[in-house]
Amino acid sequence: MLARRIIPCLDVHDGKVTRGVQFGRAENGELRCVGDPVELAIRYNEQGADEMVFFDITASAHGRQSMIEVIERAADQCFMPLTVGGGIRTLEDMGQMLRAGADKVSINSSAVTDPDLIRSGAEKYGSQCIVVSIDTKRTAPGKWEVFTAGGRKPTGLQALDWAVHACKLGAGEIVLNSIDADGTKAGFDLDITRQIADAVGVPVVASGGAGTLDHLAEVLLGGHADAVLAASIFHFGTYTVQQAKQYLQALGIPVRL
């Protein structure tokens, strides 16, 4: 069995890491400032994180340059793979982030709007660089709809169908974000995570809901996820990455220590 990955996630707004609940927004005062993204990245690198994800939730022209600078600084001081997402709409946007030091780029709303971006990105940079991030919400029993625009815009797409299609177009990884669970610390959405993990042939990263180390184990085992992405439990010192890995190893879940 391949080692499961532990991936801290940094939501970056105007150059600072923030944290909200259920996709809270800065304009509504729903975000809590956590700290400097590069300082946090260095901390998680020292703790043994397998990867680091940066999401630019500013996604403006000013925010783009700020994020490029963050990635350049982090890549210079960290030795784990870096993924960056938020506001990436073109091949040139992808190239900017990869040249800055990112190993992967994550696309979300732009992939729904222009699915060919997945194919062209995979052809130009390789599938291993293209992550499709899916924001989903349970809208009816057994139904999970894809939302875009930071979780605000329903698309009519079903999460499972979209994940399968994205992989056919060339996505090398799926990050599944549960809007219902985001920031609640109440556990991951195991049902849709398992459905997608069983249906696609690429790694699936579970995101949204991590509150305890049990939650990490549950989604890796019961949700069949290949990796877990978490924010609050690491940012606010509830657990370290090393503690999480030691806990999972004690349960027989393979991790890189």
Image: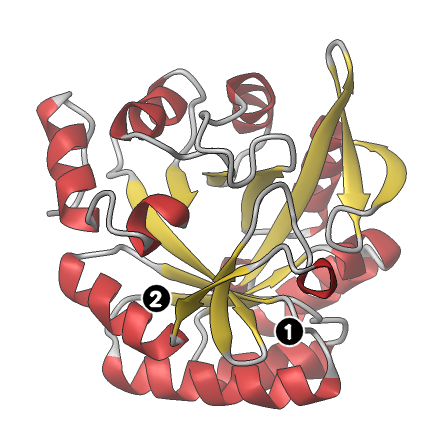
Quadrant containing the N terminus is top left
Q: Position of residue 250 (x, y in %)?
A: 9, 25
Query: Which amino acid type corresponds to the residue marked 2 in the rendered image?
Result: Pro
Residue at coordinates 29% horizontally, 87% vertically from top-left?
A: 76
Binning the other alpha carbons within 10 Å of mark 1 as few (below 14), some (14 to 19) or many (20 upward) gives few
Relative horizontal placement of residue 190, taking residue 118 as reference (left or right): left
Residue type at mark 1: give it.
Answer: Lys
Q: Residue at x 34, y 81 (%)?
A: 75
The numbered dot on residue 246 is none
Q: Give residue 16's position: percent from left, percent from top.
A: 48, 75
Q: Is residue 76 left or right of residue 159?
A: left
Q: Which mark is residue 124?
A: 1
Q: Residue 5 at what x, y percent from top left?
A: 30, 44
Q: Tell me which residue sits at (29%, 38%) in the image.
A: 4
What is the tally of numbered marks visible in this picture?
A: 2
Read off the residue under disc 2: 81
Quadrant position of residue 42: bottom left
Residue furthest right in the image: 156
Secondary structure, mark 1, is helix
